[in-house]
Image (tube, rainbow, N blue to C red):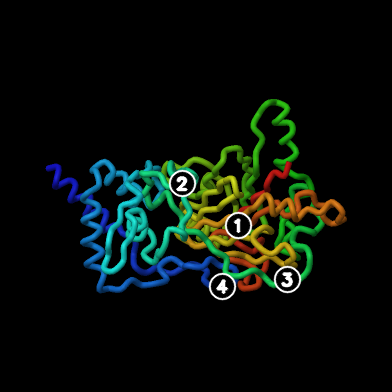
Amino acid sequence: MFRTKRSGLVRRLWRSRAPAEGDGDADTGGAAGCCLGKPGASKPNPGTEAELKALTYSVLKKIKEKQLEVLLQAVESRGGARSPCLLLPGKADARLGQQSFPLPLLLYKVFRWPDLRHSSELKRLSCCESYGKINPDLVCCNPHHMSRLCELESPPPPYSRYPTDFLKPPDSPGSVPASTETGGTAYSAPMGFSDSLALQERGEQPHWCVVAYWEEKTRVGRLYSVQEPSLDIFYDLPQGTGFCLGQLASDNKSQLVQMVRAKIGYGIQLSREPDGVWVYNRSCYPIFIKSATLDNPDSRTLLVHKVFPGFSIKAFDFEKAGSLQRPNDHEFSQQPRTGFTVQISFVKGWGQCYTRQFISSCPCWLEVIFNNR
């Protein structure tokens, strides 16, 4: 019975392996600023399929039954269900043909990214026990505790000194975003910011950012204040806690908005880490990000970067953002939050490579405003 259950778990895991080719990506038009290494972009050699299956079966049968159950939970839920770390020897190797793979890398290839070549392409999520540890004897091999590292294709050409989207005068309080000209957003009152000092006076933990959810030009729901190091923003996530967009009351009847809203799914994970703020795309569709710290600070316009499912990108760098503020410049003194905003659109892109020129034309999008105090 023990052997039969183990064999059944192994068979279920193999059936749940990552497909060799992707099923296509939504809104594929425009490649500027997208991540390198599109998942599923390279098709493995069909001749190695039998070898890969034999090797995977051999490796999985050496793993404890409880650990197989943890791996199966993570794989079948596609990371939607919370699963503990899968701690295995990190220095164990598995050989496939002429190639030798570390055990963690093999599991990541089989269950998430068949085109994965090297561990340097990966970023461990902050929720993982192995996060921040260097060369431990046991390494977490849970494929959904990892993300693919998003590399930017190339820096934008140097135009002028400032990102113009952040230099527009603010609108009136509570108005729609200032998107008719630039696609950028600005609030006349730093809603969610002005209360940070009051929170500190009461001894409460101040937030490090606030998140606004928009459908086209209309903000839906209240600003969400973030105190915890990481935040899940999702529409439908099993066991999800955080900012649930599916619970917000929206009056938008647009079929496109409703379609994109339903595709948000597991959404994104926003995490503040020592080197900056990272965004992990947990959904099944690309997201699109614009941030002043992603591009050359001398650029006049900012690129919109496409982030594929399963990829992470450092969307915001506090050190770089601080360097954007020049006390002697009139424009920056008028906008104390210059560069402290990130815009994220679900499924649909915008900008010079897309039919939508401004983010306010996107069906569902987020504005993340960082606390610069």
Asked whether, in this view, residue 372 is left or right of residue 25, the answer is right
Could you say where residue 214 lies in the image, as x and y percent from the top left?
63, 53
Kindly identify the amino acid type of the residue bearing the numbered disc 3.
Pro
The numbered mark, 2 or 1, whose residue comes first in the sequence reads 2
Residue designated by label 3: 158
Q: CA distance from mark 2 to mark 3?
A: 38 Å
What is the number of the mark on residue 134?
A: 2
Give the secondary structure at mark 2.
Answer: loop
Determine the residue positioned at 69% across, 64% down.
296
Residue receiving disc 4: 31
Q: Residue at x 80, y 52 (%)?
A: 335
Residue type of the residue flagged with mark 2: Ile
Question: Looking at the picture, which amino acid does disc 4 mark?
Answer: Ala
Instruction: Note whether 127 is above or below 266 in the view shown.
Output: above
Quarter of the image for residue 84 reads top left
Q: Relative to 150, is 161 on the left or the right?
A: right
Spot occupied by residue 238 in the image (x, y as percentages of width and height): 41, 45
Label 2: few (<14), some or many (≥20) within 10 Å?
A: few
Q: Give whichever of discs 4 and 2 has the lower sequence position.
A: 4
